[in-house]
């Protein structure tokens, strides 16, 4: 099957929103350093007592700042989903195709359960013959920023030495390392989880590569990550994993599932003190739950960001942007925790520190990014593969080296729409649309039927159906609701299986 609207151009970016009407004139106020709202300056203390407290202001210092007129903040432009790594999957998008698992082009659009179309993930531009160019740009930017920060720090310190200071410093005895943090705090969760995360560097035989993230799955040295993070290292490339303490290990791919976008690698000569991260239950996650993401955004390893679960069961289809790439599908956990290129493959944790998902894709408002590299940044829309699904896939990869997919045995249209997933007239390569003797055939489904629900999940498109099917395992019984000739029918079928990424 295919995920593209074949031949359709990428829709142009929306024009800039109109400037909101000017607010009513207000009396001039003294400038505030923050720039967010006018505040009155503190009166100077008497010269005779430099530590005297200033008199209390006449007005309420905690009064809410003036509000902008209603409607003065225009809604943001639609965003563009993309992979959240700095390498193979910097953005999603691919050449058009027509059969099962075919890649798709930039005209493809996503659907959610509110019937909102998603925009085609954009391919990441490659710099300097490969994604190595991006990494170099990131390093240069980091060095420049470091030099600037050091210079500013020296200047401020020098000024303080010359003019004296009225600040009070904490004692050095004990220091911050003696601060006790409760088990449920973000700092405590990060402290426990960081030693079990790794920054993955993947490089092809031609020198192309990128940076992603992974986390320890078991004490034998298996690491879970995204398929698109390790894709470059397949067929003779190099793969390394670096822990936060700086220890680097060579690794090899045990198995990879392109459709699920999950991969398992194994450290060569793994250390004896590996601590696997605890796995949570993604089925029990609720919208509003706190989330913590760990990764290497733009190559900045061991970065921790926080947010919430902003949606569940979000249909997402994406690819790494190469001409040979095939689509990956997920019924994703959506989070507003900041996820950027380089976070791919990293853990999404709950407030207890248990892994509830694998960070895999982002939606971005533009293709611009760090150092004009074409990378996109976070706008608060990140997508993670639910850990219950990823765990099953990882176990299969460790056991056999090949992924196993659930299937209904029918080819469905991947064209955009909100009416459901329509069974096509023919399958890939001219094969029958409904596999003879397959689950759909046994349930009585035919070409032209439009599937509108799988169990309690609304199906608005082919990609949504695929993502929902792949949350199940072969042998599961599911209820299919479909329309034929304007009449609705419901049948129960047992999902079949397909081995490998064919």
Image (spheres, helix red, strand yellow):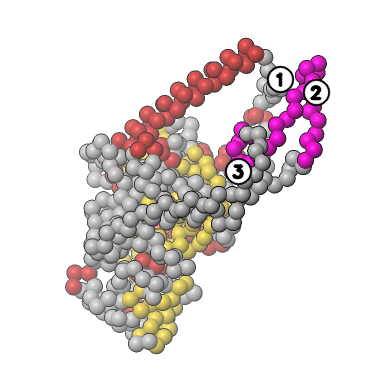
**Mark 1 — residue?**
166
Examine the rendered structure and indicate whether residue 308 appears above or below residue 145: below
Q: What's the magenta bit mostly, secondary-structure-wise?
A: loop
Q: Quadrant of the C terminus?
A: bottom left
Residue drawn where x is 71% and y is 22% of the image: 168
Q: Position of residue 2 (x, y in %)?
A: 27, 65
Q: Which label sits in the foreground, 3 or 2? A: 2
Determine if the magenta segment contains residue 50: yes
Q: Quadrant of residue 99?
A: bottom left
Viewer-nearest residue: 213 or 438? 213
Find numbered disc 3 in the image and state the secondary structure of the residue it sits on: helix
Crowding near the residue tagged with mark 1, few <14, some 14–19, many ≥20 C-alpha atoms within 10 Å:
few
Using the rendered image of the protein, determine whether residue 229 is visible from the camera's viewpoint.
no
Left or right: 46, with 224 as reference point: right
Viewer-nearest residue: 155 or 304? 155
**Mark 2 — residue?**
52
Q: Which label sits in the foreground, 1 or 2? A: 2
Mark 1 → mark 2, Cα distance in angstroms: 12 Å
Q: Position of residue 267 (x, y in %)?
A: 38, 40
Q: Earlier in the sequence, mark 3 or mark 1?
A: 1
Q: Earlier in the sequence, mark 1 or mark 2?
A: 2
The disc at residue 186 is 3
Viewer-nearest residue: 234 or 376? 376
- The stretch in magenta equals 32-59
Find numbered disc 1 in the image and state the secondary structure of the residue it sits on: loop
Mark 3 → mark 1, Cα distance in angstroms: 32 Å
Find numbered disc 2 in the image and state the secondary structure of the residue it sits on: loop
Residue drawn where x is 42% and y is 56% of the image: 78
Q: Quadrant of residue 52?
A: top right
């Amino acid at each position: 099957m295919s995920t593209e609207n074949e031949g359709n151009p990428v829709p142009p970016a929306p024009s800039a929103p109109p400037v909101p009407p000017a607010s009513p004139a207000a009396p001039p106020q003294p400038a505030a350093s923050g720039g967010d709202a006018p505040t009155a300056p503190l009166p100077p203390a008497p010269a005779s007592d430099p530590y005297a407290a200033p008199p209390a202001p006449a007005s309420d210092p905690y009064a809410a700042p003036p509000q902008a007129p209603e409607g003065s903040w225009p809604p943001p432009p639609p965003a563009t989903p993309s992979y959240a790594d700095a390498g193979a999957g910097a953005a999603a998008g691919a050449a058009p195709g027509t059969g099962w698992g075919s890649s798709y082009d930039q005209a493809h659009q996503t659907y959610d359960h509110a019937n909102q179309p998603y925009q085609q993930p954009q391919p990441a531009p490659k710099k300097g013959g490969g994604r190595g160019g991006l990494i170099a740009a990131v390093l240069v930017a980091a060095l420049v920023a470091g030099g600037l920060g050091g210079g500013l720090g020296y200047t401020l310190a020098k000024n303080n030495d010359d003019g004296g200071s009225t600040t009070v410093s904490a004692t050095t005895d004990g220091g911050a390392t003696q601060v006790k943090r409760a088990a449920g705090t973000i700092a405590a969760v990060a402290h426990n989880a960081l030693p079990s995360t790794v920054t993955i560097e993947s490089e092809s035989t031609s020198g192309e590569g990128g940076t992603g993230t992974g986390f320890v799955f078991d004490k034998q040295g298996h690491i879970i990550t995204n398929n698109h993070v390790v894709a470059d290292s397949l067929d003779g490339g190099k793969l390394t994993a670096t822990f936060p303490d700086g220890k680097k290990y060579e690794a090899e791919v045990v198995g990879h599932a392109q459709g699920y976008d999950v991969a398992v690698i194994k450290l060569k000569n793994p250390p004896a003190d590996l601590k696997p991260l605890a796995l949570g239950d993604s089925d029990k996650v609720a919208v509003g739950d706190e989330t913590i993401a760990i990764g290497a955004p733009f190559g900045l390893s061991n970065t921790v960001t926080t947010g919430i679960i902003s949606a569940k069961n979000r249909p997402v289809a994406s690819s790494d942007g190469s001409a040979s790439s095939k689509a990956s599908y997920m019924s994703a956990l959506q989070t507003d925790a900041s996820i950027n290129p380089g976070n791919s493959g990293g853990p999404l944790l709950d407030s207890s520190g248990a892994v509830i998902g694998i960070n895999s894709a982002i939606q971005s408002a533009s293709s611009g990014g760090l150092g004009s590299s074409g990378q996109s940044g976070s706008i608060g829309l990140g997508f993670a593969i639910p850990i219950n699904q990823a765990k099953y896939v990882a176990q299969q990869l460790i056991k056999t080296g090949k992924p196993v997919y659930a299937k209904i045995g029918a080819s469905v249209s991947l064209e955009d729409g909100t009416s459901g997933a329509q069974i096509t007239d023919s399958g890939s390569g001219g094969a029958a649309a409904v596999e003879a003797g397959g689950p759909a055939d046994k349930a009585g489904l035919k070409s032209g039927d439009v599937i509108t629900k799988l169990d309690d999940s609304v199906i608005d498109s082919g990609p949504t159906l695929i993502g929902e099917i792949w949350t199940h395992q072969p042998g599961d019984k599911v209820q299919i609701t479909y329309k034929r000739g304007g009449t609705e029918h419901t049948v129960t079928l047992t999902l079949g299986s397909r081995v490998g990424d064919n």
